[in-house]
Amino acid sequence: MPLGRADWADLSGALRGCDAAYVIAPNLHPDEPAHVAAALAALGDAGVGRVVYHSVASPYLPAMPHHLGKAVSEDLVRRSGLAWTILQPGAYLQNLDLTGPIDLPYSPDVCFGFLDLADLGRVAATVLTEPGHESATYELASRTATVRELADEAGVEVRRVPDPQEHPWLSAMFAYYDLHGLPVGTRVLAALLARE
Protein backbone atom coordinates (compact mmCIF):
# COMPACT_ATOMS: atom_id res chain seq x y z
CA MET A 1 0.00 0.00 0.00
CA PRO A 2 1.43 3.43 -0.87
CA LEU A 3 1.79 5.66 2.15
CA GLY A 4 1.49 9.43 2.20
CA ARG A 5 3.05 11.91 4.61
CA ALA A 6 0.03 11.67 6.94
CA ASP A 7 0.70 7.98 7.48
CA TRP A 8 4.18 8.56 8.96
CA ALA A 9 2.67 9.48 12.34
CA ASP A 10 1.46 5.89 12.65
CA LEU A 11 3.43 4.03 10.02
CA SER A 12 3.63 0.95 12.23
CA GLY A 13 -0.14 0.90 12.55
CA ALA A 14 -0.60 1.34 8.81
CA LEU A 15 1.73 -1.61 8.17
CA ARG A 16 0.15 -4.07 10.58
CA GLY A 17 -0.98 -7.20 8.80
CA CYS A 18 1.42 -6.79 5.89
CA ASP A 19 3.69 -9.71 5.07
CA ALA A 20 6.23 -7.67 3.10
CA ALA A 21 6.95 -4.05 2.25
CA TYR A 22 8.64 -2.20 -0.59
CA VAL A 23 10.71 0.74 0.66
CA ILE A 24 11.55 3.52 -1.77
CA ALA A 25 12.68 7.00 -0.75
CA PRO A 26 11.63 10.16 -2.58
CA ASN A 27 14.03 11.15 -5.35
CA LEU A 28 17.13 13.01 -4.08
CA HIS A 29 16.02 12.65 -0.47
CA PRO A 30 18.35 14.83 1.64
CA ASP A 31 18.81 12.07 4.25
CA GLU A 32 17.80 8.78 2.73
CA PRO A 33 19.45 6.68 5.47
CA ALA A 34 17.29 8.37 8.14
CA HIS A 35 14.19 7.86 5.97
CA VAL A 36 15.02 4.17 5.49
CA ALA A 37 15.91 3.69 9.18
CA ALA A 38 12.50 5.09 10.19
CA ALA A 39 10.74 2.79 7.72
CA LEU A 40 12.70 -0.24 8.94
CA ALA A 41 11.88 0.56 12.57
CA ALA A 42 8.18 0.82 11.68
CA LEU A 43 8.34 -2.48 9.80
CA GLY A 44 9.88 -4.15 12.83
CA ASP A 45 7.28 -2.64 15.19
CA ALA A 46 4.47 -3.78 12.90
CA GLY A 47 5.79 -7.33 12.69
CA VAL A 48 6.42 -7.17 8.93
CA GLY A 49 8.94 -9.89 8.22
CA ARG A 50 10.24 -9.01 4.76
CA VAL A 51 11.46 -5.85 3.09
CA VAL A 52 12.40 -5.06 -0.49
CA TYR A 53 14.55 -1.93 -0.70
CA HIS A 54 14.63 0.14 -3.89
CA SER A 55 18.25 1.27 -4.23
CA VAL A 56 20.19 2.20 -7.37
CA ALA A 57 22.71 0.54 -9.67
CA SER A 58 26.27 1.14 -8.45
CA PRO A 59 25.30 2.63 -5.08
CA TYR A 60 28.86 3.17 -3.93
CA LEU A 61 29.91 5.98 -6.26
CA PRO A 62 31.72 8.67 -4.25
CA ALA A 63 31.18 11.19 -7.06
CA MET A 64 27.39 10.96 -6.63
CA PRO A 65 26.12 11.90 -3.14
CA HIS A 66 22.60 10.55 -3.67
CA HIS A 67 24.06 7.15 -4.61
CA LEU A 68 26.11 7.13 -1.41
CA GLY A 69 22.92 7.67 0.61
CA LYS A 70 21.55 4.52 -0.96
CA ALA A 71 24.76 2.60 -0.17
CA VAL A 72 24.42 3.52 3.51
CA SER A 73 20.72 2.61 3.38
CA GLU A 74 21.54 -0.79 1.88
CA ASP A 75 23.77 -1.45 4.89
CA LEU A 76 20.89 -0.55 7.21
CA VAL A 77 18.59 -2.94 5.35
CA ARG A 78 21.12 -5.78 5.52
CA ARG A 79 21.53 -5.29 9.29
CA SER A 80 17.80 -4.77 10.01
CA GLY A 81 17.03 -8.29 11.19
CA LEU A 82 14.33 -8.54 8.52
CA ALA A 83 14.40 -10.87 5.55
CA TRP A 84 15.57 -8.50 2.82
CA THR A 85 15.99 -8.15 -0.91
CA ILE A 86 17.68 -5.17 -2.55
CA LEU A 87 16.84 -3.99 -6.05
CA GLN A 88 19.42 -1.83 -7.83
CA PRO A 89 17.73 -0.36 -10.91
CA GLY A 90 19.65 1.20 -13.77
CA ALA A 91 18.55 4.45 -15.40
CA TYR A 92 14.83 4.49 -16.12
CA LEU A 93 14.05 4.24 -19.81
CA GLN A 94 10.95 6.39 -19.27
CA ASN A 95 13.13 9.32 -18.14
CA LEU A 96 13.84 9.88 -21.83
CA ASP A 97 11.07 11.36 -23.97
CA LEU A 98 11.67 9.54 -27.24
CA THR A 99 8.84 11.33 -29.07
CA GLY A 100 10.87 14.41 -29.94
CA PRO A 101 14.34 15.90 -29.69
CA ILE A 102 16.22 14.79 -26.56
CA ASP A 103 18.09 17.55 -24.72
CA LEU A 104 20.87 15.97 -22.69
CA PRO A 105 23.29 17.63 -20.23
CA TYR A 106 25.82 14.81 -20.63
CA SER A 107 27.33 12.77 -23.44
CA PRO A 108 24.83 10.84 -25.58
CA ASP A 109 27.58 8.33 -26.45
CA VAL A 110 28.24 6.66 -23.08
CA CYS A 111 26.76 3.28 -22.16
CA PHE A 112 23.80 2.88 -19.81
CA GLY A 113 21.84 -0.02 -18.49
CA PHE A 114 18.27 1.19 -19.02
CA LEU A 115 15.40 -0.26 -17.01
CA ASP A 116 11.84 -0.24 -18.30
CA LEU A 117 9.52 0.61 -15.39
CA ALA A 118 7.16 -2.19 -16.41
CA ASP A 119 10.03 -4.64 -15.92
CA LEU A 120 10.81 -3.10 -12.55
CA GLY A 121 7.19 -3.64 -11.53
CA ARG A 122 7.33 -7.27 -12.62
CA VAL A 123 10.53 -7.88 -10.68
CA ALA A 124 9.18 -6.14 -7.58
CA ALA A 125 6.03 -8.29 -7.69
CA THR A 126 8.17 -11.41 -8.09
CA VAL A 127 10.49 -10.76 -5.17
CA LEU A 128 7.64 -9.58 -2.93
CA THR A 129 5.42 -12.59 -3.53
CA GLU A 130 7.71 -15.54 -4.30
CA PRO A 131 10.09 -17.28 -1.91
CA GLY A 132 13.81 -17.62 -2.52
CA HIS A 133 14.84 -13.96 -2.86
CA GLU A 134 15.92 -13.34 0.72
CA SER A 135 19.43 -11.90 1.17
CA ALA A 136 19.71 -11.19 -2.56
CA THR A 137 20.85 -8.01 -4.30
CA TYR A 138 19.73 -7.65 -7.90
CA GLU A 139 21.17 -5.06 -10.30
CA LEU A 140 18.55 -4.51 -13.00
CA ALA A 141 18.50 -3.35 -16.61
CA SER A 142 16.17 -4.21 -19.48
CA ARG A 143 18.74 -3.28 -22.12
CA THR A 144 22.09 -1.62 -22.62
CA ALA A 145 22.47 1.28 -25.03
CA THR A 146 23.68 4.83 -25.43
CA VAL A 147 21.15 7.62 -25.55
CA ARG A 148 22.20 8.24 -29.14
CA GLU A 149 21.34 4.64 -30.04
CA LEU A 150 17.90 5.02 -28.46
CA ALA A 151 17.37 8.33 -30.26
CA ASP A 152 18.41 6.82 -33.60
CA GLU A 153 16.01 3.91 -33.10
CA ALA A 154 13.19 6.35 -32.33
CA GLY A 155 14.13 8.61 -35.23
CA VAL A 156 14.65 11.67 -33.05
CA GLU A 157 17.52 14.10 -32.60
CA VAL A 158 19.67 14.19 -29.47
CA ARG A 159 21.14 17.56 -28.51
CA ARG A 160 23.84 18.32 -25.95
CA VAL A 161 22.71 21.16 -23.65
CA PRO A 162 24.34 22.86 -20.64
CA ASP A 163 23.72 21.50 -17.16
CA PRO A 164 20.67 23.44 -15.87
CA GLN A 165 22.26 23.49 -12.37
CA GLU A 166 18.93 22.69 -10.69
CA HIS A 167 20.49 20.69 -7.86
CA PRO A 168 24.14 20.06 -6.93
CA TRP A 169 23.53 16.30 -6.74
CA LEU A 170 22.05 16.30 -10.25
CA SER A 171 25.04 18.28 -11.51
CA ALA A 172 27.36 15.72 -9.92
CA MET A 173 25.37 12.94 -11.59
CA PHE A 174 25.53 14.60 -15.01
CA ALA A 175 29.29 15.08 -14.65
CA TYR A 176 29.74 11.41 -13.76
CA TYR A 177 27.46 10.27 -16.59
CA ASP A 178 29.40 12.43 -19.02
CA LEU A 179 32.55 10.45 -18.29
CA HIS A 180 31.27 6.99 -17.45
CA GLY A 181 27.56 6.54 -18.19
CA LEU A 182 25.96 3.95 -15.90
CA PRO A 183 26.49 0.48 -17.38
CA VAL A 184 24.30 -2.30 -15.98
CA GLY A 185 24.00 -5.85 -17.27
CA THR A 186 20.72 -7.41 -18.39
CA ARG A 187 21.16 -11.05 -17.40
CA VAL A 188 19.83 -10.72 -13.84
CA LEU A 189 16.53 -9.20 -14.95
CA ALA A 190 16.22 -11.78 -17.74
CA ALA A 191 16.71 -14.59 -15.24
CA LEU A 192 14.22 -13.13 -12.75
CA LEU A 193 11.56 -12.77 -15.47
CA ALA A 194 12.50 -16.08 -17.13
CA ARG A 195 13.40 -14.45 -20.41
CA GLU A 196 15.81 -15.73 -23.02
Image (cartoon, grey):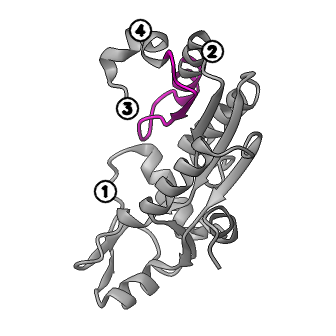
Q: Name the residue under label 4.
A: 10
Which quadrant does the C terminus fall into? bottom right
Q: Name the residue under label 3.
A: 2
How far apart are labels 2 and 3 at the CA level?
A: 18 Å
Query: What residue is rendered at 47% in x and 75% in y?
Result: 107
Whether label 4 touches label 2, CB < 8 Å: no
Asked if the stretch drawn in magenta spans residue 176, the answer is no
Left or right, 4 with respect to 177, comes to left
Left or right, 120 with respect to 163, comes to right
How far apart are labels 4 and 2 at the CA level?
A: 13 Å
The residue type indicated by label 1 comes to Pro
Q: Which of marks 4 and 2 is nearer the N terminus?
A: 4
Q: Earlier in the sequence, mark 4 or mark 1?
A: 4
How far apart are labels 1 and 2 at the CA level?
A: 41 Å
Q: Determine the secondary structure under disc 3.
A: loop
Whether label 4 touches label 1, CB < 8 Å: no
The residue type indicated by label 4 comes to Asp
Q: Which of marks 2 and 3 is nearer the N terminus?
A: 3
The residue type indicated by label 2 comes to Gly
Q: Mark 1 points at which residue?
A: 164
For mark 2, does the 10 Å Cα neighbourhood hold few (<14), some (14 to 19), or many (20 or more) residues? some
Asked if the stretch drawn in magenta spans residue 30, the answer is yes
**Which stretch did the figure color magenta?**
16-38
Q: Name the residue under label 2.
A: 44
Mark 3 vs mark 1, foreground winner is 3
Residue 105 % position (x, y): 38, 66
